[in-house]
């Protein structure tokens, strides 16, 4: 866990009362603090005992020039300040150096994690999501378990428990939880939650079949498919994009062989975005190549998005399962693959949209 420490005792009361909701640090700190990080907010001098104020989650990290700070940035950092001159004097006092308006600063906004709200469903869900984002699957499972007790009629909580169980390596438990939703999709369970559960079950079983280490469990996997209903109306092509970070929102698009070239890409029709999955099911395969495209929509996010593309297809040689790791960065925002007639999945380049250029100024123009 990272520490967000404050030296000035003037901040103690502001922090405890929730009046201070941001900190402005000199320099670019985006490499150290990330949106979604859980930090311990402390107070005290360097090389001295420090007092823990509370745990917090970082809401945003923004790097800008000092002169570009907004009045809201300044007020969230210190409710007593309104003018940029006040902020400059304070920073020069803290850092013991002269600071110019062109110097970079980092505005870090944060929110307290309220541990003493055991009956607040939103707090349980948010805390569980934060634990999952940091890879603490067992802690996330505990919070989702509490949420299940608070919202016993919310079927989506079973999906959250299944995701946390799978993150912790308990695939059997994840499949059982998803099966409970799938089998109860008769009006007692939200159809959307049941549909997302079936998507995740299809992906998990496909991964098990593709894992050579589990080849000895082939009969068991087939039995699971029958139990979960995954064998009912099997598609000719199934493609799913999955990811584990709760705050990621990559998007899956598809282009069918019969799609005219002047028609835009189609968004995957099966969306479980809030549960880390988007998918496409094709009942009858068209002759030709299918194209799949994954896009990153957030413009300002600094963290890379890691996901996996799973494609299951029926070819002449039988069922073929392909798994492709996906990493979207600030520069590689769109990636594309094609599904061959033999079931192979290969990467294809994404055409680069030319950047418009300004016409040259006439000779002699100023």
Image (cartoon, helix red, strand yellow):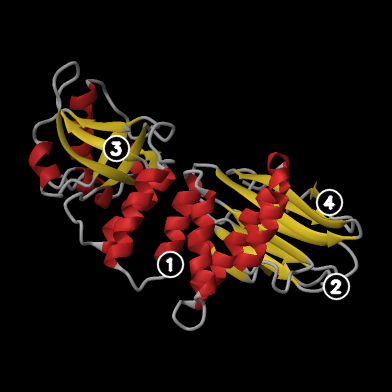
Q: Depth check: give the residue in front, 104 or 119.
A: 119
Q: How crowded is mark 2: few (under 14 residues within 10 Å), some or many (20 or more)?
A: few
SS label for mark 1: helix
- Residue closest to the far top: 47
Residue 31 picture quarter: top left
SS label for mark 4: loop
Task: Tell me which residue sits at (25%, 21%) in the image.
Answer: 97
Q: How far apart are marks 1 and 3 (CA)?
A: 28 Å
Q: Is 134 left or right of 265, judged from the image as shown? A: left
Q: Distance between the residues labelled 2 and 1?
A: 36 Å
Q: Mark 2 points at which residue?
A: 258
**Which badge, 2 or 4, comes first in the chain's sequence?**
2
Q: Are marks 2 and 4 in contact (CB under 8 Å)?
A: no
Q: Distance between the residues labelled 1 and 4?
A: 34 Å
Q: Do the residues labelled 1 and 4 touch (CB within 8 Å)?
A: no
Q: Position of residue 125 (x, y in %)?
A: 34, 58
Q: Mark on residue 39?
A: 3
Q: Name the residue under label 4.
A: 344
Q: Mark 1 points at which residue?
A: 156
Q: How far apart are marks 3 and 4 (CA)?
A: 44 Å
**Which badge, 3 or 4, comes first in the chain's sequence?**
3
Q: Does 11 sit above or below residue 205?
A: above
**Which badge, 2 or 1, comes first in the chain's sequence?**
1
Tell us which disc is closer to us: 2 or 4.
Answer: 4
Residue 351 visible in the displayed image:
no
Q: Depth check: give the residue in front, 196 or 259.
A: 196
Residue 365 visible in the displayed image:
yes
Which quarter of the image is occupied by the N terminus?
A: top left
Q: Does 301 sit above or below residue 238?
A: above
């Amino acid at each position: 866990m990272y520490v967000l420490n404050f030296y000035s005792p003037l901040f103690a009361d502001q922090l405890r009362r929730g009046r201070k909701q941001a900190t402005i640090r000199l320099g670019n700190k985006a490499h150290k603090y990330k949106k979604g990080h859980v930090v311990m907010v402390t107070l005290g001098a360097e090389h001295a005992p420090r007092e823990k104020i509370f745990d917090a989650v970082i809401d945003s990290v923004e790097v800008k020039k000092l002169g570009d700070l907004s009045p809201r940035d300044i007020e969230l950092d210190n409710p007593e300040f309104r003018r940029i001159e006040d902020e400059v004097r304070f920073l020069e006092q803290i850092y013991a150096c002269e600071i110019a308006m062109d110097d970079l600063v980092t505005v870090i906004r944060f929110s307290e994690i309220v541990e003493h709200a055991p009956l607040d469903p939103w707090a349980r869900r948010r805390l569980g999501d934060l634990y999952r984002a940091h890879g603490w699957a067992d802690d996330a499972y505990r919070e989702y378990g509490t949420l299940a007790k608070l919202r016993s009629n919310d079927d989506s909580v079973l999906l959250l428990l299944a995701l946390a169980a799978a993150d912790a390596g308990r695939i059997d438990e994840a499949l059982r939880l998803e099966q409970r939703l799938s089998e109860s999709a008769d009006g007692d369970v939200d159809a959307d939650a049941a549909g997302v559960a079936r998507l995740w079950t299809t992906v998990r079983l496909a991964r098990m079949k593709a894992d050579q280490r589990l080849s000895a469990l082939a009969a068991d996997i087939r039995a699971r498919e029958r139990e979960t209903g995954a064998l009912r109306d099997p598609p000719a092509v199934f493609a799913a994009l999955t990811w584990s970070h709760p705050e990621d929102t990559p998007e899956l698009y598809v282009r069918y062989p019969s799609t005219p070239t002047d028609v835009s890409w189609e968004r995957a029709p099966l969306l479980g975005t809030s549960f880390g999955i988007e998918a496409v099911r094709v009942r009858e395969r068209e002759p030709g190549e299918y194209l799949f495209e994954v896009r990153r929509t957030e413009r300002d996010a600094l963290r890379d998005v890691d996901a996996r593309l799973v494609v299951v297809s029926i070819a002449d040689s039988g069922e073929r399962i392909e798994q492709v790791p996906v990493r979207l960065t600030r520069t590689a925002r769109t990636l594309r693959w094609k599904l061959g007639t033999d079931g192979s999945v290969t990467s294809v380049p994404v055409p680069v949209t030319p950047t418009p250029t300004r016409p040259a100024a006439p000779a002699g123009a100023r």
